[in-house]
Amino acid sequence: MKATQDTLVTPIPDARPAATPLPPKSARLKRVQVVALALLVLAGFVNYLDRSTLAIANQTISGELGFTPTEMGLLLSAFAWAYAFAQLPIGGLLDRFGARLTLGLGICLWSIAQGVLGLLSSLHLMILARIGLGIGEAPQFPAGAKVVSEWFNVRERGLPSGIFNLSSSLGPAISQPILTALLLWLGWRQMFIAMGVLGVLVAALWYLSYRDRVQVALDDAERAHLDAGLPPQDAGLRLTFADWLGLFRRRLTWGVVIGYVGIIYMLSLFLTWLPAYLERVHHLSLSQAGWVASLPFLAGACGVISGGLLVDRLTRSGRSLAFSRKLPICGGLAAAGLFALCSAGVTGIGSVILCFSLALFSLNVAVAGTWSLVSVAVPSHQVASLASIQNFGGYFGGAFAPVITGMIVQQTGSFGLALGIAAAVAVAGALSYGLLVRLPDTPS
């Protein structure tokens, strides 16, 4: 028990890690890294396709079933609240049982819930299906942080963190035209069912193709490459309940919990209301809204890769692990808030889309920093737990964005106030990461 208590207060040192070269990387290790990231990106695309279906079909479903904007806001938010609370146990499950099993089961669950939703008409039953979707999708991004911490050296985790988060922006960008086309071709019910079938196939591919680090017989050179720069006790340990509870006694944990709300609140607003905003305010057709809505998310995809590259560049230049992550996080959040606020004050659709694109680019620079941060803030057997706690905070706060936006639109007929609130929350998130997060960290 003493060993696990020691690791609780011994995170990865916040050194300047560029002094000595890394041991060489084997061809097999490169292959494992490529396969792991490719599978994470594929699963992430399906993840975001599935969570975006309701936003794409928002106007169609509300028109057919007679739901008000407030009721649609509740239906959209049901996913986020379920997703948020499922984060609390899911990190421990990932650290205990590994990403292969936990994420595989999660993909199966969310795909079944997605297919079932296409068969329903009752608001209450649809809310239950969205809750199932949220619980099933919960392992996706903490699993990504776990995979990166297991298969990438601490100096190389920025870009992989950006890549596995690529789906959080590129997924919505691609989903807008793809799901719009499916909606027009199949109808909303068949669209949900088709996406459910696709998800089950992806779950099987993940489980058959990916292996956790403990399931692979690494040689000494491969272990030396992966573990260079880590404390000696950071290998082979398993998470205990005391470890998990101990995370809540740390200022770092509360810094990332509060800070991540700034990211997810704004992201949730765009994911759930952007197509409806374009249809309501700028009077675009359903097909036009699908294509135009993809542009800000394409900018976001560029942002998350840029953020990952920036993290690694700062780290290799000799900057501390804290600085190389907090600079993109705090700068990205502050810029996203500024551009979101600007979007509320312009009227032309070109200017609006430009502001939205710059906001999501900046927001996703911060996203890459946040997931790289949790991969170096604690020992590897606690990474998924800290990542999921961060995700819990973000999605608990972010769950209010769809319903608050729906209420504002219903009462005022405008999205301006909703965008202003998102901007303020983003700036508050930047302050939380900047003031509360320190590496190394100790229990308070």
Image (cartoon, grey):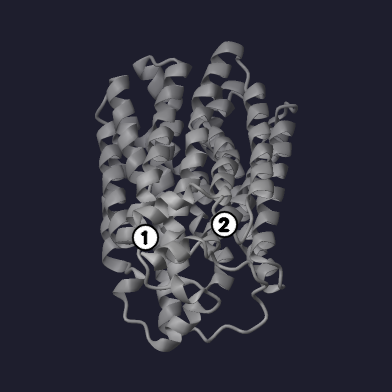
Q: Is residue 229 above or below residue 305?
A: below
Confirm whether residue 351 shows in the render: yes
Neighbour class for label 1 at 10 Å: few (<14), some, many (≥20)?
many
Residue type for callout 1: Leu
Res 239 label: 1
Q: Quadrant of residue 59?
A: top left
Q: Quadrant of the N terminus?
A: bottom left
Which residue is drawn at the image coordinates 52% and 50% (left, top)?
A: 170
Which residue has dot 2 on it?
A: 442
| Disc 2 secondary structure class | loop
Front tag of 2 and 1:
2
Alpha carbon distance from label 2 to label 1: 18 Å
Instruction: Choose between 433 and 144: the one closer to the eye.
Output: 433
Neighbour class for label 2 at 10 Å: few (<14), some, many (≥20)?
some
Q: Is residue 314 above or below residue 184?
A: below
Specify whether 433 is left or right of 50.
right
